[in-house]
Image: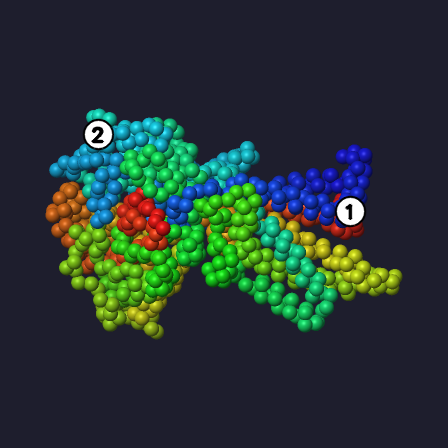
Amino acid sequence: MSGRGQDEAERAVARLTRRRLLGSTTAAAAGLAAGSFAWFAERAPAYGAAPNVLRILQSEPVYGFNPVLESTNWPETNRMVYNGLVDVGPSGQPVPGVASSWTVNENGDTFTFKLIPGIKFTDGTELTSDDVKFTYEMLVDPKLGSTLGSFVSNLKNVDTPDKYTAVLRFDGPNVLMMPLVSPMGILPAHLWSNGDPHTNKYLHAPVGSGPFIVTEWQHGDHISFVRNPNYFRKPKPYVDQVFFKVAPDASTGLLSFLNHDLDVVLSQGIPGGPPYDQMRRILDAKPPGVVATVFEQNWVQNLFVNTAKPPFNNVKVRQALAHAIDKAFIVKSLLFGFGKPEETLVADTPATKWAHASNIKPYDHSVEKANALLDEAGFPRKGGTRFPVTILATEGFRVQLSEALREMLRTVGIAADIKTYTYGEYIGRIRQQDTAACVWTLFISKQMDPAAICEYVNGKNAHVGGTDFSAWDNPQVTAWIPQARATTDRAKRAPLYVKIQEVVHEEVPIIPLYTADGIDLWYSRITGLHSVDSLTGTMESVENARITG
Amino acid sequence: MTYRYVAGRLVQSLVLIGLVVSTAFALIHVAPGDPVTYLYGGQAVSGEVLAQLRHAWGLDRPLWVQYTAYMGNILRGNLGYSQINFQPVAAILGESLPNTLLLMIPSVLLAAVFGIALGIAAARRPGTGADYAIGAVSLVSYATPPFWLSVIFIVVFASRLHWFPTQGMATLGDAGGGLARVADIMWHMVLPLGVLAWWYSASFTRLTRASVLEESRKYYLLTARMKGLSEFQVFYRHALRNAMRSVVTVLGVQLGTMFAGAVMTEIVFAWPGTGRVIYTAILQHDYPVVLGFFLIVGAAVILANLAVDLAYAVIDPRIRFA
């Protein structure tokens, strides 16, 4: 730097008195404040909305509107903007969606859907069988790794004999297509066929055939939908605008609801379930004008152990564990009564009731029986303790559950230490089977058919990285699982699932703990909503909602 | 010499920022788990599909390849793309950062004003009841977890008294515009701002009191009094001005770190800021978002420190840069 430059710099600093600094800083701060408020005012939510508005709590934001990619997070939310081939009726049965009718051949490997003519996407193009073909081909594209896709991975091809007929042909029968996958939204092929779908701009500004159109999305805060005036089920939808309000803390979200800042709280918008204690207080208090719907969900909380490594490679230890756990206590004290104990691999829930083995005698909660089995297994108490185990946990509800389990294990002489991880680390450790002498829980959702849960006890998946997390390989069960999927005839399938459940119950690679209820809340001025657990869930009925009074 | 000093410090800062990002990169990859495991690990998805996804996302490449690719992108001004959130990192941070700053800047400034005022009040009357009362209040403020205070504020001021909204940054679906919108945002800000200002003010109070008392014991104040200056002049023109150096240091650091947001306060009040974004990104192993965030916060802290160092010269004429 030149000498002259240095002098100027020195003079500049000399001129910068404290008073000038304070003055200019204040002026700058005031300018900044005024400017930022003007900027925020510009970005604030769309005002001037009609009073016919529904505000729904979402405790986690959705990632993007593509049902193929979004299947891990909130598949239900996609129903706002897309329609599936079918919808799910009040008792869980398929009813027409964009398909007016469908047939399944006797082998269960060919599904023919007849589409309703004239359905338009919101950009004006017609929804045709080409869009169905495109969406289902995207679903099974292994590069995208859609979790829903894994349920229809034997899809061979999709034929489109005409504009309104789509024929899905599978390589062998598929039992999960109708109950689980068929409500998945159909994408407009012309907007998704180019480039990587992960970076497609329509993830955030979707074009669908559904009842609503996204008009604004402030990430982490809210999504605004307005009614699709050209929806094919006229005069639906009845509300003019819907907001998904993101409130990451579900407890505060519930307070907002009680404060009338929100109109609807849906269980599906709260991952891991709502805060049950708070829900119990709300239901007991019976706030005026609040409609509370408690409904059965098709998901089960299961306890896992690694059956390939000591001490849980001993079946007696696993049976002792089943006796040591007081499921009724968990349901009463942690779920506040919102659920019921579960005893079998195929749960006694609406979708799988037909295959549930009701004949199985539960492992009753008995410290004596657990102690006797552990003694027999060769694990005597030494100084009060038989052996140590680690309970793997994540933040949130699983910590409470783990603490309850630790106490239950202590009563039978098993010293348990709880290790808490982030969910990614937790599930990574479980997948890698780094779980010797560990106990952990996983809730498995969307059990619309017993075939789904069986993948967790299928010996073919018992390798490191597979989905048989307990590393349990029973040749009989492994042989029955594909047999039970080889037909769509429930009369033939159910006995096989009963046999599978009997062996699983005897060998205890998994201990089913409980099913938890869904709890939906809305104000009585809202009618037409219907609580159901499916791929599209209660969200399916938002198009029927009306606001009165 | 000033320009050369500033230029030197800027170069140092850039190197430091690079180090911050590199360390973050190493740490995040040392931690077990990855975004694919987070998203799909618990689902009935085979290990082969998971491997395919890792390949598609470039997560199976050697770490040094991933590192050089990332640093190359950073140098080209590309913060990367979040495969989990389906958005460019710049868009994610660009959307949440202004919200955080809108909340944090007034919180820290308000805390500084009140904290310094209380600190001065305590230091003017050391050992009196007022001093002890201010000390007790600031101790309680500092020891109160902001998330707990947030819930209390919501229960009292929103749920019971209905003075303020429970959460969010603006009312949904209400009529109004222009100034009404500004008023609405400010109305939503009151509770989270109150919590944060309450918490931040405690450290300013304690620091101001301690620094002023420290200065009060020095001989130059005796000299000032001997010159016949009034107590007001002695205190405000001499003692306080010198005491402010340490307060400005803290203020600078606070202004830098506030880019990180206040995670729990943002979560409880559903404030759509960076604190919550980074919290979620860490849980999800969303590498590009976490690294982009470290880059921004690191740069903010380092530059705030530089600004504080330069401000010393203005506050204290004895300091010259060389």
Residue reaching furthest to the front: A549
Q: Which of B270 and B249 is in front in this view?
A: B270
Q: In which quarter of the image is the N terminus of chain A?
A: top right
What chain does badge 1 belong to? A
What chain does badge 2 belong to? A
The quarter of the picture where residue A409 lies is bottom left
Residue occupying the point 34% across, 74% down: A383
Do discs 1 and 2 belong to a common subunit? yes
Percent position of residue A431, x then y:
34, 49
Does the rendering let one see residue B238?
A: yes
Between the C-alphas of marks 1 and 2, the distance is: 80 Å
The quarter of the picture where residue A521 lies is bottom left
Q: Is residue A346 left or right of residue B212?
A: left
Residue reaching furthest to the top: A162
Q: Do the residues labelled 1 and 2 touch (CB within 8 Å)?
A: no
Does the rendering let one see residue A271?
A: no
Q: Name the residue under label 1.
A: A17
Residue occupying the point 39% across, 45% down: A52
Residue occupying the point 39% across, 42% down: A241
Percent position of residue A512, x then y:
26, 58
Looking at numbered disc 2 in the image, what kind of residue is underneath it? Thr
Percent position of residue A3, x then y:
81, 35
Which disc, if any, is residue A165?
2
Q: In this view, does A128 lie to the left or right of A37?
A: left
